[in-house]
Image (tube, helix red, strand yellow):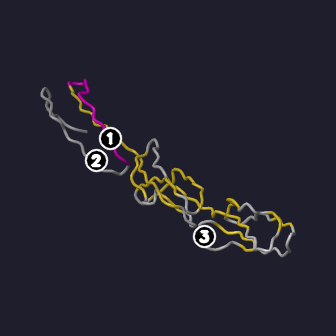
């Protein structure tokens, strides 16, 4: 009675019987199965048949994967910045990471950024927005001469609303804004 079955599953992939007689030499070999990877076997994959039934076990793991999508989201438009695949096996744990991209600000992610791999492909999404900035210049104007008093930077992302305010300075009087 020769067995091949996957780990982390309750069913055998295949059961093979080798007929024979006491003292007959036997030799078994692992087999290849789609979507399964050989893991290990019992130590009796070859030997001499006895009066007792000999069980030989080949253990397999089912392949699994996690696909991590890094996406720029602008309104209803989504553009993939990068995609990454994490290979593994059913039952193994996975942990994805939030990445930093120049010109983008992290916004949110799906709730499955860590977990246990399953037979179905797991898709994880990290959402980013394009970085934007507004530079506010506070300028003293005397005739044709302009001197910057202060500069203020407001950072955010594309389509985010922003607001600026005039400032009061002790030696200067507000004139106008452009």
**Residue that appears at 60% across and 70% down:** 9
- Could you tell me residue 131's position as x and y percent? 40, 45
Q: Quadrant of residue 61?
A: bottom right
- Mark 2 and mark 1: span between their CA atoms? 8 Å
- Could you tell me residue 171's position as x and y percent? 13, 26
Residue under label 3, please give it: 9
- Please say if 125 is above or below 135: below
Q: Quadrant of the N terminus?
A: bottom right
Q: How many marks?
A: 3
- Mark 1 and mark 3: span between their CA atoms? 57 Å
- Mark 2 and mark 3: span between their CA atoms? 55 Å
Pointer 1 local density, CA inside 10 Å: few below 14, some 14–19, many at least 20: few
- Could you tell me residue 19's position as x and y percent? 83, 76
**Residue that appears at 35% across and 51% down:** 159
Pointer 2 local density, CA inside 10 Å: few below 14, some 14–19, many at least 20: few
Which of label 2 and label 3 is nearer to you? Answer: 3
Q: Quadrant of the C terminus?
A: top left
Pointer 3 local density, CA inside 10 Å: few below 14, some 14–19, many at least 20: few
Q: Residue furthest front?
A: 51
- Could you tell me residue 107's position as x and y percent? 39, 52
Residue under label 2, please give it: 162
Tell me if 73 is positioned left or right of 168 in this view: right
Q: Secondary structure at mark 3?
A: loop
Q: Secondary structure at mark 1?
A: strand
Q: Nearer the viewer, residue 131 or 169?
A: 131
Q: Are marks 2 and 1 in contact (CB under 8 Å)?
A: yes
**Extent of the magenta region:** 142-157
- Please say if 16 is above or below 75: below
Which callout, 2 or 1, points at the residue further toward the start of the chain?
Answer: 1
**Residue that appears at 68% across and 61% down:** 37
Residue under label 1, please give it: 134
Q: Nearer the viewer, residue 36 or 50?
A: 50
């Amino acid at each position: 009675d020769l067995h091949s079955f996957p780990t982390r599953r309750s069913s055998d992939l295949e059961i093979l019987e080798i007929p024979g007689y006491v003292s007959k030499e036997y030799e078994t070999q692992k087999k290849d199965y789609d979507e399964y990877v050989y893991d290990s076997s019992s130590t009796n994959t070859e030997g001499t048949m006895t009066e007792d039934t000999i069980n030989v076990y080949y253990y397999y793991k089912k392949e699994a994967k996690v696909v991590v999508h890094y996406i720029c989201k602008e309104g209803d438009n989504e553009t993939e910045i990068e995609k990454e695949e994490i290979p593994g096996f059913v039952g193994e744990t996975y942990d994805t990471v939030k990445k930093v991209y120049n010109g983008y600000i992290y916004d949110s992610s799906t709730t499955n950024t860590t977990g246990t791999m399953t037979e179905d492909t797991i898709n994880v999404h990290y959402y980013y927005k394009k970085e934007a900035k507004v530079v506010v210049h506070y300028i003293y104007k005397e005739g044709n001469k302009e001197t910057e008093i202060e500069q203020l930077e407001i950072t955010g992302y594309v389509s985010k609303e922003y607001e600026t305010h005039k400032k009061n300075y002790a030696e200067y009087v507000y004139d106008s804004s452009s």
